[in-house]
Amino acid sequence: MPGAESSLAYAPGEFEAYAAFSVEGWAVWVRWVAGDEPVPALPDTMTVRVLSRGESLTEQELGVVTVTVSARCARCGGPRGWDTLRPDRFQEDGEWFTVDRWANPCGHQDEYAAVLQESRLRPPPAPPRPMPTAPPIAEAPEPGSPAGIVLAAAKASRGMRAVQAAVLLATEHGLTAEADLIRAEVKAVGCQMSALAAAHFLHTIGKGSR
């Protein structure tokens, strides 16, 4: 595509992607994370309350079970509706129950029986990888310096990510070298990095001043 190399949407480090295997086969899911608003991190699992008619229950008896399953759609591998979870309270045979409901962006619906079966087959989830945190900066970077620009932006926009800070440096201040350093560090750590951590990174490697 002509001019794609200069387009913000095609800048390196502005996308998150993962490969997923499901009943429909392998798929690669990609999303853009360099917009003006912070993008919530995708969780690996989701814990939900589902309806169960356990093996020891009759058809008229109900139970509510809390299970942990993948945050990816079992049908296509796309993100599940973990961010649409809401409680649903209902009454049956004079007794009240509360379960969770959610809507998957892909359009595939999760049946409670299938979710229960998935939870039985799924191994215990691995502990989440800790997100790198930024230790306090002993000496604040100079205002207007690369680290200072990122630090000010991070304080003004709570939840700002390192990839967004890289876009800010490159597009609004022409600091492409510093932006590339941040992108390389994000790729090296292999997980999400905050803009505050990016500011600390620039400051500690001597990019805190022009």
Image: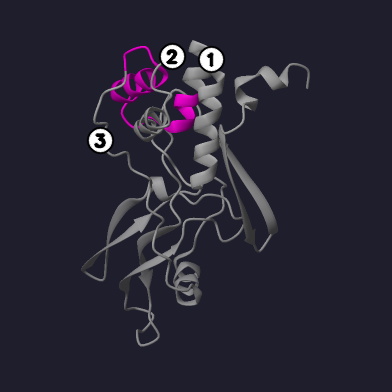
What residue does disc 2 label? 210
Q: Earlier in the sequence, mark 3 or mark 1?
A: 3
Q: How many marks?
A: 3
* Badge 3 amino acid: Pro
Asked whether residue 52 is drawn in magenta, I would say no
Where residue 82 appears, x then y in whole percent?
A: 42, 50
Left or right position of 98 against 83: left
In this orientation, which residue lies closer to the viewer: 53 or 207? 207
**Residues shaded magenta:** 142-166
Count neighbours of disc 2 (C-alpha within 10 A) and say few if under 14, some if 14 to 19, many if 20 or more.
Answer: few
Are the residues flagged by discs 3 and 2 in contact, CB closer than 8 Å? no
Where residue 160 appears, x then y in whole percent?
A: 38, 29
The N terminus, quarter of image:
top right
What residue does disc 1 label? 171
Label 2: element kind: loop
What residue does disc 3 label? 136
In this orientation, which residue lies closer to the viewer: 163 or 103? 163
* Badge 1 amino acid: Thr
